[in-house]
Amino acid sequence: MSALGGRKLLGSIKNQVSVYTFTLLGRVLVVRTTTKEPCYYLQVTQAEGGTSKISVGFDGKTAWSQGPDGVTQVLTGEKRAAVISDAAGGNDSEIFPARWPTTVSLKPPETHGDKTYVVLDITPKGGLSHDVFLDPQTYQPMIERSVDSSATSISVVNELGKGPLGELQAQSITTTRSDGFPQVTATLQFVRDNGDISDTIFAPPLGKGGVTI
């Protein structure tokens, strides 16, 4: 949901790197997300100034994660579906289904705060269904709601700015979960479009053995 804009402009973005930071339990965490068409995805989270990291990726076939212990896990079931959803969304598959098969359907309007939004159900193949709330005047996606077996997560765009190619970019996003996880607000620090990115970075890394979960 971080990159927004017209179809032609978004279609010109073949890959993107974005860096957001947020504070959790007194620590600043840095989230670096790399996407590349058609549906490549890599997200790395680590504490600011730290070396330990958690990585999650999708190379178009395998969804995987790697923790600070260096063990690579091949993800299945709902964990795999969640990563596919992030990968599809990060590559705007709801606009460009040739990148990843995605079904979009209209739901009844809903009110959030003091505004009534147009609501779309977006379901990527093999992924999780989630709702996107569009501003009724601009039709820009401003809220995303996802539900899994453990919690409902709602992410609200607080502020929009311009990305490198002029696309609208979420500068600040607040996420709230129903399971009691602390509310966090992520702030954009850096974004780059259409850099030189190898497909190999999205493949499961070699780790200390490997497990399937």
Image (tube, rainbow, N blue to C red):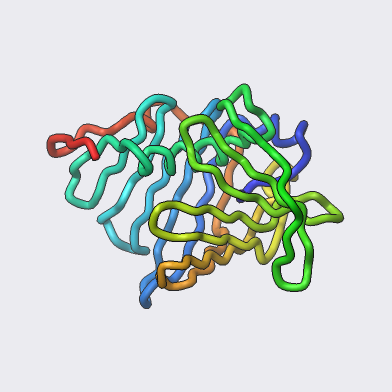
- Report the residue that reaches farthest toward the left: 209
203 and 92: which is toward the camera:
92
Q: Residue 178: x percent and y percent?
A: 47, 67
Q: Is residue 145 above or below residue 97?
A: below
- Report the residue that reaches farthest toward the top: 98
**Which residue is pictured at 49% across the width and 42% down the height?**
128
Whether residue 132 sits left or right of residue 183 in the image: it is right
Whether residue 99 sits left or right of residue 209 in the image: it is right
Q: Is residue 166 above or below residue 187?
A: above
Q: Residue 78: x percent and y percent?
A: 38, 42
212 and 24: which is toward the camera:
212
- Displayed quadrant of residue 94: top right
- Report the residue that reaches farthest toward the bottom: 26
**Which residue is pictured at 62% across the width and 62% down the height?**
156
Q: Residue 193: x percent and y percent?
A: 61, 39
- Report the residue that reaches farthest toward the right: 137
Q: Is residue 32 above or below residue 12?
A: below
150 and 47: which is toward the camera:
150
Q: Quadrant of the C terminus?
A: top left
**Which residue is pictured at 69% across the width and 33% down the height?**
95
Q: Is residue 164 above or below residue 15?
A: below
Q: Residue 16: x percent and y percent?
A: 56, 39
**Which residue is pictured at 75% across the width and 35% down the height?**
9
Tag count in the figure?
A: 0
